[in-house]
């Protein structure tokens, strides 16, 4: 093992080591030093309560901006304020594998329905050779029906098994991006005038998304030094989804909304946009990682010596909720999706290594970004277990003398009080979730509203099994060198009666 690989492995161990050290110490000390663990649990629960409080505050601010954004006529404001808006082209990358035609068509219909000229779109349908004739047949049908609707419509087929890559979305869009670059060069379009939007194939954009994006781009002092992050909803199939899938969908959306309010700690997630100039400068998406959606921001941050940011867009794009042919299959797919997202822990060693090599990025920015990464991954994995599982352990195993102490007798009351205060977060997101629901449709029973209300009772279990455990799994795999591959989230649009 050479020195570089050794440093890489040490850095990969750190996140998982912190998590397992917390669990092992909390469990072991509960038997020998229960008072210490009681203090730790109380302090941690207090910390979590403060996090819930500022989560609620930021969510309310974000919600206000979101509602205001939906009411604004972005297209009218764009053409009134920027004469050069017609110079901008939108390169829309749509990577797919074996999704059905109906999903692809719905995404393209949403693009056509945008309040924005279709002749400003360059659409790339990026498929995989390993999908075989299936993709080629879908691509041919799509090209025939939609090819003439945009300025250009390009179909790319990623060969696969290319050097230095893994079978993943990042490798596909890296190849598609290079093919699009050739087309843009042929058309003679200035890279600074091309805005790239990378969408999952099931992404339904808001009709004003591209107007909002273009206005933000042209209004920025440094438009090519920023990515642009919309609100991500998982609403396309929310009425058909089971309670655990819905809880994960809403939780992800509300987490992202609170991050939008704090752009200094925001990085790209899922569907997002950026300038083509920046994309070329960073060498396109990395081909050998799973979390390419967030890595592309860090690539820009390092390439421009810290002079790169994310601009929040309070306009939504919507994707499918996790699905499966059966409830059990859906739960497994949900776990895999959450584990794939938690694999973003792979950014930690990447950032540390590049920060040591780059002296132009300020120390403050380095420390802040590393703290956001490590603290976020740590609490993602540990918080639900500490709060809902380990919190009572030292009280149960302590000797009678300790159990009769003032601390031991008051700890359950204090923890219950802190937990009850934290429930305000559930009340807020539970209430707001109803305002995010799309039209119910005639095939969905009104009784589904009842399940939408009572689903929040399951949140503690959902946080343990579909948040904490996948994060522990991901960090343990990185720690032990069992690297995670890319899994495609199944897309289903079938509607069942309830």
Image: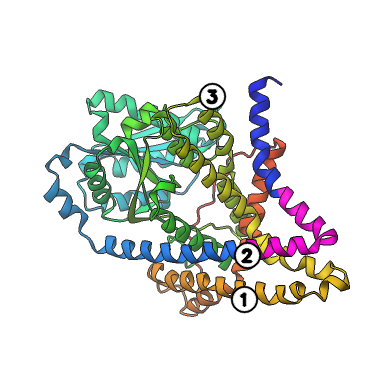
User: Can residue 15 be seen from the camera position used here?
Assistant: yes
Between marks 1 and 2, how big is the CA–CA gap? 10 Å
Q: Secondary structure at mark 2?
A: helix
Relative horizontal placement of residue 163, taking residue 76 as reference (left or right): right
Where does label 2 land, which residue? 45
User: In the rendered structure, which disc, 1 or 2, sits on the residue that comes first in sequence?
Assistant: 2
Between marks 3 and 1, how big is the CA–CA gap? 56 Å
Does the magenta portion include 39? Answer: yes
Q: Residue at x 46, y 39 (%)?
A: 364
Task: Identify the disc placed on residue 417.
Answer: 1
The residue closer to the viewer here, 18 or 145, is 18
User: Is most of the magenta stretch helix, strand or loop?
Assistant: helix
The residue closer to the viewer here, 186 or 219, is 219
Which residue lies most toward the top here? 2
Does the magenta portion include 386? Answer: no
Task: Identify the disc placed on residue 162.
Answer: 3
The boundaries of the magenta stretch are 20-44
Note whether 349 is above or below 81 in the view shown. above
Q: Residue at x 37, y 70 (%)?
A: 439
Percent x, y for residue 244?
Answer: 58, 65
Q: Quadrant of residue 163?
A: top right
Which residue lies most toward the front here? 406
Q: Residue at x 82, y 56 (%)?
A: 28
Note whether 110 is above or below 497 in the view shown. above
Relative horizontal placement of residue 120, taking residue 278 as reference (left or right): left
């Amino acid at each position: 093992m050479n020195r570089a690989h050794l440093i890489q492995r040490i850095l990969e161990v750190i996140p998982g080591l912190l998590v397992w050290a917390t669990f092992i110490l909390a469990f072991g000390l509960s038997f020998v030093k229960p008072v210490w663990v009681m203090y730790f649990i109380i302090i941690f629960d207090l910390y979590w309560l403060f996090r819930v409080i500022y989560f609620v505050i930021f969510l309310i601010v974000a919600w206000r901006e979101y509602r205001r954004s939906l009411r604004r006529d972005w297209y009218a404001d764009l053409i009134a304020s920027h004469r050069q808006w017609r110079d901008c082209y939108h390169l829309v990358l749509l990577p797919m594998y074996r999704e059905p035609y109906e999903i692809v068509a719905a995404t393209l219909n949403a693009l056509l329905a945008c309040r924005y000229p279709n002749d400003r779109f360059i659409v790339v349908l990026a498929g995989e050779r390993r999908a075989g004739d299936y993709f080629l047949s879908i691509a041919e049908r799509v090209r025939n029906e939609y090819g003439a609707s945009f300025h250009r419509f390009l179909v790319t087929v990623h060969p696969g098994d290319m050097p230095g890559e893994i079978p993943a979305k990042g490798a596909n869009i890296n190849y598609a991006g290079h093919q699009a670059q050739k087309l843009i060069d042929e058309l003679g379009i200035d890279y600074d005038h091309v805005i790239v939007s990378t969408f999952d194939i099931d992404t339904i954009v808001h009709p004003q998304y591209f107007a909002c994006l273009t206005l933000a781009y042209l209004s920025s002092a440094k438009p090519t030094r920023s990515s642009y992050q919309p609100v991500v909803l998982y609403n396309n199939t929310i009425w058909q989804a089971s309670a655990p899938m819905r809880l994960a969908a809403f939780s992800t959306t509300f987490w992202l909304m609170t991050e939008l309010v704090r752009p200094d700690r925001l990085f790209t997630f899922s569907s997002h946009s950026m300038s083509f100039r920046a994309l070329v400068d960073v060498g396109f998406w990395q081909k050998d990682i799973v979390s390419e959606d967030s890595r592309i921001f860090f690539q820009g941050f390092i390439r421009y010596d810290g002079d790169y940011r994310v601009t929040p867009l309070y306009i939504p794009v919507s994707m499918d909720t996790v699905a499966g042919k059966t409830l059990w299959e859906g739960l497994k797919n949900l776990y895999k999706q959450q584990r794939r997202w938690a694999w973003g822990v792979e950014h930690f060693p990447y950032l540390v290594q590049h920060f040591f090599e780059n002296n132009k990025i300020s120390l403050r920015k380095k420390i802040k970004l590393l703290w956001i990464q490590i603290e976020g991954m740590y609490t993602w994995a540990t918080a639900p277990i500490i709060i809902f599982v380990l919190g009572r352990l030292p009280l149960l195993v302590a000797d009678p003398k300790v159990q009769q102490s003032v601390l031991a007798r008051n700890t359950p009351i204090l923890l219950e009080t802190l937990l009850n205060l934290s429930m305000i977060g559930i009340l807020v997101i539970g209430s707001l979730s109803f305002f995010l629901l799309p039209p119910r449709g005639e095939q969905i029973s009104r009784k589904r509203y009842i399940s939408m209300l009572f689903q929040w009772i399951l949140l503690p279990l959902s946080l343990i099994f579909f948040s904490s455990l996948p994060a522990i799994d991901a960090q343990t795999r990185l720690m032990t060198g069992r690297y995670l591959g890319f899994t495609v989230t199944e897309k289903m649009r079938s509607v069942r009666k309830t």
